[in-house]
Image (cartoon, rainbow, N blue to C red):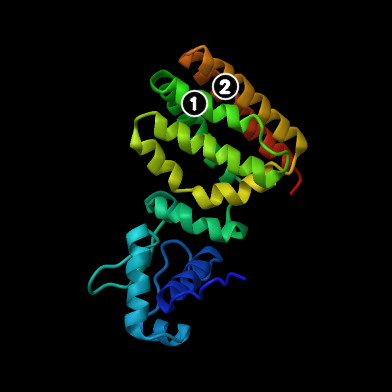
Amino acid sequence: MSWTPPQRPAALTETRLIEAILTGQYPINSTLPAERDLAEQLGVTRPTLREALQRMARDGWIDIQHGKSTRVRNYWEEGSLGVLNTLAGHSQHLPQDFIPKLLQVRLLLAPAYTRDAVQHRPGDVERLLADLVNTTDDPPSFTRADWTLHQVLARLSGNPVFSLILNGFAELYHNLGVLYFSSEDNRSHSLRYYQQLYQHSRERNADAASSLTRTVMQASIARWEQLHAGE
């Protein structure tokens, strides 16, 4: 049996503070209590609290300035990719329109890195898709396959910035992908995409691969919204 190691005190403190921010206990642009008071409330030492606050400041959750109260930043506008990683563990606090907006970002990126990958490394793309078209028909398998596709296409594009951006929401992608692929129709839709993209890579048609990807990414937004309609 494998055991999940307990969080270090600073990591646990960070988690509790972020939950307090996301639930509105400390809303955007509010100030945190003084360090001594906050440490007592959390039941941690001041050095532990400082470590947690420094980590949160690095990712854009809070603004620390000497001689001033610590301010909760507008993390949606001022945060870094680290915020996306953290939000993966707090999906219950995400705004309703957050996932469609995240998919809009993928819509902007995916056609570009797909075109570049097929243009520069068509043989590698073809071999990747030859495996993916045989993906086992269940949500976890499709989630892993879809993540692998985008991760590898980004890498094969030759532009490492694509990979850095994608890696910023890797955990969130995996958590929500299982929900998206719980629909058999969504799995079939993605499988057809893998098959068509495979054909375009065999034909070395980078523009067609990009156009196809844009169409499929647009459709995935509508499919996600349909899946969660009425929630």
In this view, the residue in front, 59 or 160, is: 160
Q: Is residue 126 above or below residue 96?
A: above
Regarding residue 90, the answer to whether it shows in the image is yes
User: What kind of residue is marked 2?
Assistant: Leu
Image location of residue 196, percent across then percent down: 61, 19
Task: Identify the residue at image location x=52%, y=27%.
Answer: 127
Q: Is disc 1 in contact with disc 2, using a CB cutoff of under 8 Å?
A: yes
Q: How far apart are the alpha carbons under marks 1 and 2?
A: 9 Å
The residue at the point 55 percent across, 41 percent down is 147
The circle on residue 197 is 2
Tell me the crowding category of disc 1: few under 14, some 14 to 19, or many 20 or more residues within 10 angstroms, Cα based.
many
Amino acid of disc 1: Val
Residue positioned 73% across, 44% down in the render: 182
Dividing the picture into quarters, in which one does residue 141 lie? top right
Mark 1 vs mark 2: give the one in front: 1
220 vs 66: above or below: above
Residue at figure coordinates x 46%, y 31% from the top left: 153
Percent x, y for residue 152? 46, 35
Q: Nearer the viewer, residue 3 or 9?
A: 3
- The answer to whether any part of residue 96 appears in the image is no
Placement of the N terminus among the 4 image quadrants: bottom right
Is label 1 in a helix, a strand or a loop? helix
Crowding around mark 2 (Cα neighbors within 10 Å: few <14, some 14 to 19, many 20+) is many
Image quadrant where residue 189 sits: top right
Image x and y of residue 188, in percent: 72, 30
Q: Position of residue 99 (x, y in %)?
A: 58, 44
- Taking the image as shown, residue 116 lies to the left or right of residue 107, namely left
Mark with earlier residue (1, 2) = 1
- Closer to us: 29 or 165: 165
Q: Is residue 215 above or below residue 163?
A: above
Name the secondary structure under disc 2: helix
Residue 125 is labelled as 1
